[in-house]
Amino acid sequence: MPARAAEPEQLAIMVGGINKLIYLPARLAERLGYFRDEGLDVELQSQPTGIDGENEMLAGAVQGVVGFYDHTIDLQARGVEVRTIVVFSQVPGEVQLVAAKRVDTIRSMADVRGKTLGVTGLGSSTSFLTKYLAQRAGVPSTEYTLLPVGADSSFIAALRQGRIDAGMTTEPTVTQLLKAGDAKVLVDMRNVDGTRAALGGTYPASSLYVQTTWLDAHPREASKLARAFVRTLRYMHTHSAAEIAAQMPAEDVGNDRELYLSALRASLPMYTADGRMPADGPPTVLKVLAGFNPDVKGRHIDLSRTFTNRFVDGVKP
């Protein structure tokens, strides 16, 4: 009898908003067949925020999360060991927008006193970053309101309805609101220069992180995931926005293909080419979190335990 082909290994990964461009490598790896090439059957699940994905991982419902690296620091401060094994973006890809009707009164983060600021969720990376930007501008968190409004259509509705005066979101929502004239850019963290100006360094953000106990028990699976994602990042650096968009499902591209392409072109500079953690990244993220997060402030954080380049470094050119 002919030998039966081995069944692919099944893994579940939670994505903090699967149609956000900051997390595009997850969907693209699936569409390019790179998980399958590694003998993996990866189920990509989606939650509206990174904090939801984190909770699913800690509950054991998924093996990994595609979310922001800063969660690994926050979790270590709370006694949970999590490591990023592939870094997708060296900057947050987030943009602080101000509603068009508020541009005369909110010209910088120093003007957010008494205002309502939209974030995807309380405890999410958008809330971390919003608090830091306001604090850096001299506005303590007691002098404005954070309102969780989700992402995509719910964020757009909150801005248009006046429930938020400003808010932090990602592409393609940013380009959609700018094109419609509903918002203006207040802080742009879609590229390295803008991020360094806002935060003082690169800010590794979108990444794949897993619990350290899982990683120690499954180095083979981690290596396969790393290879699939590094191949994806290399693809993104050697193909045009139009070629990348052609790989994506229709529901991600939406009805306005030109808008999607414009948003994607604006986002491409943020992605890493090799999945490695930038050297100045972890200290910048720790500085941001220690500025206001009571779990992190004043605590010793061992940054070497929040990420590893071991698996991406093992991927052959």
Image (cartoon, helix red, strand yellow):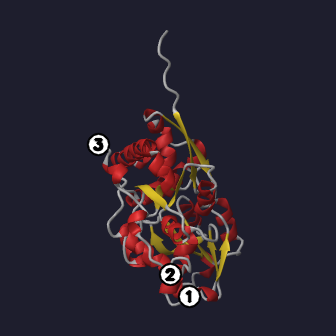
Identify the residue at image location x=57%, y=84%: 106
Label 1: which secondary element: helix
Of residues 52 and 183, the one drawn nearer to the viewer in this rendering: 52
* Tally of numbered discs: 3
Mark 2 to mark 1 CA distance (whole Å):
25 Å
Give x and y (percent) for residue 182.
61, 70
Give x and y (percent) for residue 306.
43, 63
In the image: residue 9, left or right of residue 303: right
Mark 1 to mark 3 CA distance (whole Å):
49 Å
Q: Nearer the viewer, mark 1 or mark 3?
A: 3
In the image: residue 129, left or right of residue 160: left
Of residues 142 and 262, the one drawn nearer to the viewer in this rendering: 142
What residue is disc 3 on? Answer: 316
Label 3: which secondary element: loop
What residue is disc 1 on? Answer: 111
Which label's residue is closer to the chain start, 2 or 3?
Answer: 2
268, above or below 290, in the image: above
What residue is disc 2 on? Answer: 297
Identify the residue at image location x=38%, y=65%: 304
Label 2: which secondary element: loop
In the image: residue 203, left or right of residue 11: left
